[in-house]
Amino acid sequence: MEGAGYRVVFEKGGVYLHTSAKKYQDRDSLIAGVIRVVEKDNDVLLHWAPVEEAGESTQILFSKKDSSGGDSCTSEEEPTFDPGYEPDWAVISTVRPQPRHSEPTRGAEPSSPQGSWAFSVSLGELKSIRRSKPGLSWAYLVLVTQAGGSLPALHFHRGGTRALLRVLSRYLLLASSPQDSRLYLVFPHDSSALSNSFHHLQLFDQDSSNVVSRFLQDPYSTTFSSFSRVTNFFRGALQPQPEGASSDLPLPPDDEPEPGFEVISCVELGPRPTVERGPPVTEEEWTHHVGPEGRLQQVPELKNRIFSGGLSPGLRREAWKFLLGYLSWKGTAEEHKAHVRKKTDEYFRMKLQWKSVSPEQERRNSLLHGYRSLIERDVSRTDRNNKFYEGPENPGLGLLNDILLTYCMYHFDLGYVQGMSDLLSPILYVIQNEVDAFWCFCGFMELVQGNFEESQETMKRQLGCLLLLLRVLDPPLCDFLDSQDSGSLCFCFRWLLIWFKREFPFLDVLRLWEVLWTGLPGPNLHLLVACAILDMERDTLMLSGFGSNEILKHINELTMKLSVEDVLTRAEALHRQLTACPELPHNVQEILGLAPPAEPHSPSPTASPLPLSPTRAPPSPPPPADTAPQPDSSLEILPEEEDDGADS
């Protein structure tokens, strides 16, 4: 939109001021507004006004002093309140908040309390911008001026912080602080101080002149791709304030550095080693590890062989019971038989609990009824092209149904969530015994149950860890994805949720899982599997000019086209390359199991979780059956609607 002497280049509604310091805001303490970036005369202004004053772009007001003008204007519909997750993570959720409708307010008086909050600032007056911590209900930005004052925090209830930063980067250089990844120091493009810093940089790096030209052509992407070297020259200005010093930013104290902070400066990785995978472990080789009384010997060596080559098909039925914790690696044959008898009795006692529920009782048990309906629907379309499950009245489907319902009795807190049938199907196919398959499935769920929590915190944490690894391994790919609104890696959501079950042919999934179940060469190998796939596709993604929708489409079309051996070979090579780096950031070492997790500075409940292994997360209480967010049965990842998740 254009007017006399100005042009609106960015506009976003649903940007709120929170006028109360309370953790949970009530409606009276929220002021809805519109944020705009406006080119006016020879200046660029950032303007926020309540919806009552925002009006049409042609009626834009540029300062509090001008707030008396303006025609009657149309208010935006008040946004719905936060449902507990951000749009990027709602790709598997069927829960939507109920909208609250309010009558549009027209012709607000300038003297209204809300009107007094409007502000306008020239971009040249900005000193720094701070982003919110990850995991908050709403992302926010705090703008600090050169005069040392901070403007009211802008809470983006509908997302949009990254979009705003992209627009600002057309006019400013945003320098990430090496001490605080959420803080950006603001420089105009013609800043003499910045130019001087580049001049000094050129004394050490002959290629740095290209950095300057790239900044001028594409400041946003270049800021995040090349500024890691430049920020060393701003360390003095960006050092944390000494204890007791006043702060310009009225924000809650940071309990933990944001994951990924340590990789702002470049990490020099050595050459990627060559990896050769071995042949599968045969039944004869397994027999050589069976000692007196049926006890397995040299178990670490056996696990290493499984990791490097997998298992021959005829051995899986026995070996998977050990890999999934159903049978002890140290037990004797007699101990195993006694254990199986005990677990068989336990299984059928749990199965009887739901089998004995009459239809009248089930009508009064909405939770059980909901689980049964969901399981029946999912089972009816799980791996139906596999001979073990194809055709009507297939007994395999009945076993899937019974095992999943019994799991609801075993794990009341978690119950059944869509996607679990995908994890059980290969186990039942291999084990071909109802009781043994159930307990093996329970062992697998011990590893991944956090993926199915209602809060989705484990999935968020895993995607954050994946981004950390990818940032160290391939910064240009990260920068490209970020420039295409795909930097949150939400297109990898399904991969991690069900451990690539739908990305590889069925038999390849068996090989992939048994390798991952060894726990070698350390925790979170599944994240390096994701990195390996992205590494294999990097040239296609970066050289094709794909946008966010094309990236999503390309990733989805990889299904059944990947070679599991190639992916595992590359994932192991990436692991070796990372572990050989002497300067690997500590939080990356944590992900790879090379270092213990750092102790939190304080036990604040709002602290961001450390990027640890997602396994064995505590279960969440079961939500009501009629409102529980469940993954869509197709598990198709939808295009990102907004960017709140990526903002964090």
Image: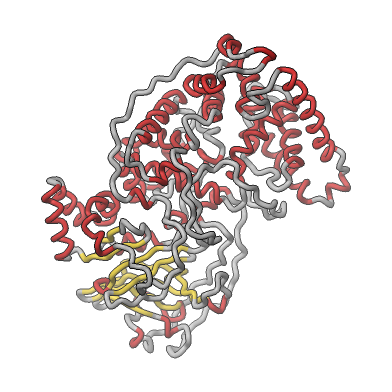
100 to the left or right of 233:
right
Residue 207 image position (x, y, % from top left): 15, 45
Vertically, is 392 above or below 263? above
The N terminus lies in quadrant: bottom left
Q: How far across and down, in percent of the image, does residue 505 sit? A: 52, 26
- Can residue 573 be seen here? yes
Q: Is residue 619 above or below residue 281?
A: below
Does residue 505 appear anywhere in the picture? no
Task: Give the residue drawn at x 57%, y 59%.
Answer: 84
- Specify whether 129 is left or right of 171: right
Give the image quarter of residue 401.
Answer: top right
Where 233 falls versus 29 (above or below)? above
Q: Which color scheme did the rendering employ for the protein?
A: secondary structure
Residue 285: give x, y in percent of width and height.
56, 11
Of all residues, the one furthest to the top in this rendering is 284
How many numbered discs sit on the rendered protein?
Answer: 0
Please name the residue shown 72% across and 36% down the image: 404
Pick whichever, 248 or 544, lies toward us. 248
Residue 428 spot, x, y in % from top left: 67, 26
The residue drawn where x is 74% and y is 47% is 370
The residue drawn where x is 46% and y is 51% is 640
The one of 50 and 172 positioned closer to us in this rendering: 172
Q: Which residue is more in the foreground, 88 or 323?
A: 323
Residue nearest the observer in this picture, 102 or 346: 346
**Quadrant of the drawing holding the C terminus:** bottom left
